[in-house]
Amino acid sequence: MAVVGSDILIKRGALEEELLPAREGRSRVAVLSQAGAIGVARTVHDRLAASGLTVELVTVPDGEDAKSLDVARDTYLALNQMGMTRHDSIVAVGGGSVTDLGGFVAATYLRGIEAIYVPTTLLGAVDASIGGKTGVNVGGKNLVGVFAHPARIVIDLDVLDALPDHLRRQGMSEALKAGLIGDPDLVVLLEQRGLGADLKEVVSRAVAVKTGIVEADFREAGQRAMLNYGHTVGHAVEMSAGVSHGEAVAIGMVAAGAVSAALAGFTGAERQRTIIESLGLPVVVPGEPDRGDLLELIGLDKKRDASGIRMVLLEAIGSPVLKTVDDDLIETALNAIGVTGNG
Ligand SMILES: NC(=O)c1ccc[n+]([C@@H]2O[C@H](COP(=O)([O-])OP(=O)(O)OC[C@H]3O[C@@H](n4cnc5c(N)ncnc54)[C@H](O)[C@@H]3O)[C@@H](O)[C@H]2O)c1
Ligand SMILES: [Zn+2]
C-alpha cells in the first residue's frame, strides 16, 4: 500500500522483511527508540547492522517526554556525532511519541533526511504513524511540527499481538473511530470480536480509512477534520481526568454520539456505546469530573467559532459531518458521559 510517498507494510514478521527502501549512498542508520520499545529496537538495530550498515541506537526519554525541543536537540547532536549525511536514514521504533519526534527530527535535520517508522503500539500503527504529521510539544501539545511523510512504515503484527492489554485497548479506540467515520465493516468486526479481533484486519482497515482521508486532504482543509471524531470532548477529558488518549477518545465518542443523535439523526449511539464497553473502554468520565473545567476546556478547543463549537458528528456509521454545536448540546454531551451538576 502506498500513501503520498510512504509504503506501508502490514504483516506478521514484517521486521524480517526489507526494513529500508532502496537508497543510493546510505551508509548510516540511527535507530531512535525509548524504553518501552527497546526490545524491538534492538532487533531492528541488529538486523540492519548485519546488512553492513553503521547503525546506532539513540534512546530518548519514555512516552510523551520524548516530544520536546530539548530531546530533539539532543537527537540532532547524536546524529551529528554519528556523521549522518543527507543520504542516511532515521528509523523510529516505538509508539506515537517516538514516530512524532523521529519524523520531526528527520524532516528538519540537514533540511530533511529519510525517515522510516516502525510503530510498536496499536495506536501508533493505526493512527500516529500514518498521515505525515510530526511534532513536539512546546507550551501546548503538538504546537511545533511539520508535515512530512516517512519513506516506509513497517507494521509487524507479531509485535502488536504481544502488547499489554491497556495498549491494545487504547489503539482499539482509534481503530473504532476510523470505522465509525469511514468503514462500517470494521465497526461490525469490532462489535463481533471485541479485543480479540484479528489485528491484520483491524490495522489494515483503520490504516486504509486514515490514508484515504489524508490523501484527499493532506493539509487539513476539510475532510481531514473528520479524524477528530470523539476528540473535541475527548481532549478535554484527557486534560482534566488524567485518562489515556485512547480512553479519552472513547468517552469523547460517547459524547459525540449523543450530540449526533440530537443534531444529525444518528440512530447508532447505543450501539456505539455497547461496542466501546465491549472493548473494555470507558463510557463515562471516571472520578468526580468538574463540569466547569470540562466546559472551559471544550471551549478552548481549536474547533470553536463565534456561534459555538465545530464538532464532528455522525449521520450514520460511516457518514461523518462537521457541524456547529451550541452550548445546550454540549450539555447533552456532558450528561451522556456522566458529568452532571452545575459546575
Ligand atoms: N502524528 C499523528 O498524526 C498522531 C496521531 C495520533 C497520536 N499521535 C501522538 O502519538 C502519541 C501517543 O502514541 P502512543 O499511544 O503510541 O503512546 P507512546 O508512544 O507514548 O507509548 C506509550 C507507552 O508504550 C510503550 N511502548 C511502546 N511500544 C511498546 C511495546 N511494543 N510493548 C510495550 N510497551 C510499549 C512506550 O515506551 C510508552 O511508555 C502522542 O504523543 C500523540 O500526540 C500522533
Ligand atoms: Zn486521537
Image: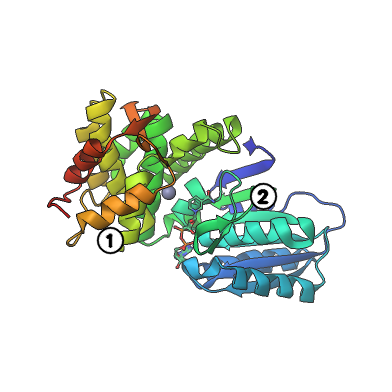
For badge 1, the amino acid type reads Ala
Q: On screen, 231 above or below 286? A: above
Q: Which part of the image, by quadrant, shows the C terminus?
A: bottom left
Residue at (83% x, 58% y) in the render: 87
Residue ID for mark 2: 150
Element carrying mark 1: helix
The residue sitting at 59% across, 61% down in the picture is 101
Q: Which residue is mark 1?
A: 241
Q: Reading the chain from its start, which is encountered first: label 1 or label 2?
A: 2
Q: Residues within 10 Å of mark 1 (few under 14, many from 20)?
A: some
Q: What's the residue type where badge 2 is placed?
A: Pro
Q: Where 73 sits versus 22, above or below?
A: below
Q: Nearer the viewer, residue 305 or 291?
A: 305
Compare residues 182 and 193 and report the one nearer the observer. 182
Distance between the alpha carbons at the discs numbered 1 and 2: 33 Å
Determine whether the beta carbon of the residue marked 2 sits less than 8 angstroms from the nearest atom of ligand 1: no
